[in-house]
């Protein structure tokens, strides 16, 4: 069973972030989950009992 455990945290003031910072944060935290599912689907469809575990924590 695939396990996703990836993420970053960047604590700061929202008004000090620029769009590039936000895109990087979302690219790691959200896009990584999308891409892992996208590439796992062929294997997941071969077994009805398969699944994926997503873990999110600032302490991973």
Image (cartoon, grey):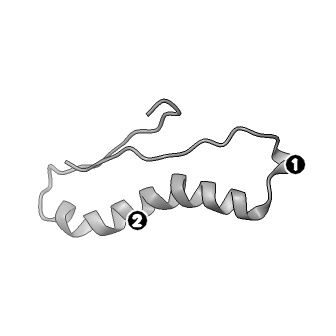
Q: Secondary structure at mark 1?
A: helix
In what element is the residue under mark 2? Answer: helix
Q: Position of residue 5 (x, y in %)?
A: 38, 44
User: What residue sits 81% from the left and 45% below the top?
Assistant: 14
For marks 2 and 1, give the CA distance. 29 Å
Q: Residue furthest top?
A: 59
Q: Residues within 10 Å of mark 1 (few under 14, many from 20)?
A: few
Q: Nearer the viewer, mark 2 or mark 1?
A: 1
Residue at 76 percent across and 63 percent down: it is 19
Lateral position of residue 44 relative to residue 24, left or right: left
Q: Which mark is residue 35?
A: 2
**Image height of 4 relative to 28, above or below:** above
Count of marks placed on residues:
2
Badge 2 density bin: few <14, some 14–19, many ≥20, Cα 10 Å: few
Q: Which mark is residue 31?
A: none
* Residue tagged 1: 15
Where is residue 34 shown, x and y percent of the image? 44, 62
Direction from residue 42 to residue 47 in the image, left or right? left
Q: Position of residue 44 (x, y in %)?
A: 20, 60
Are circles 2 and 1 on residues that touch, CB within 8 Å? no
Q: Is residue 55 above or below residue 24?
A: above
- Between residues 51 and 59, which one lies in front from this camera angle? 59
First in sequence: mark 2 or mark 1? 1
Residue positioned most to the right: 15
Q: Position of residue 57 (x, y in %)?
A: 49, 34
Q: Residue at x 18, y 51 (%)?
A: 50
Residue under the point 66% across and 43% down: 10
Foreground pick, 12 / 57: 12
> Quick one: quadrant of the C terminus?
top left
């Amino acid at each position: 069973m695939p396990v996703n455990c990836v993420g970053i945290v960047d604590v700061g003031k929202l008004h000090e972030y620029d769009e590039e910072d936000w895109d990087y944060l979302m690219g790691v935290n959200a896009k990584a989950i999308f891409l892992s599912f996208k590439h796992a689907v062929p294997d997941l469809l071969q077994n009805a009992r398969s699944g994926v575990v997503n873990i999110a924590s600032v302490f991973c």
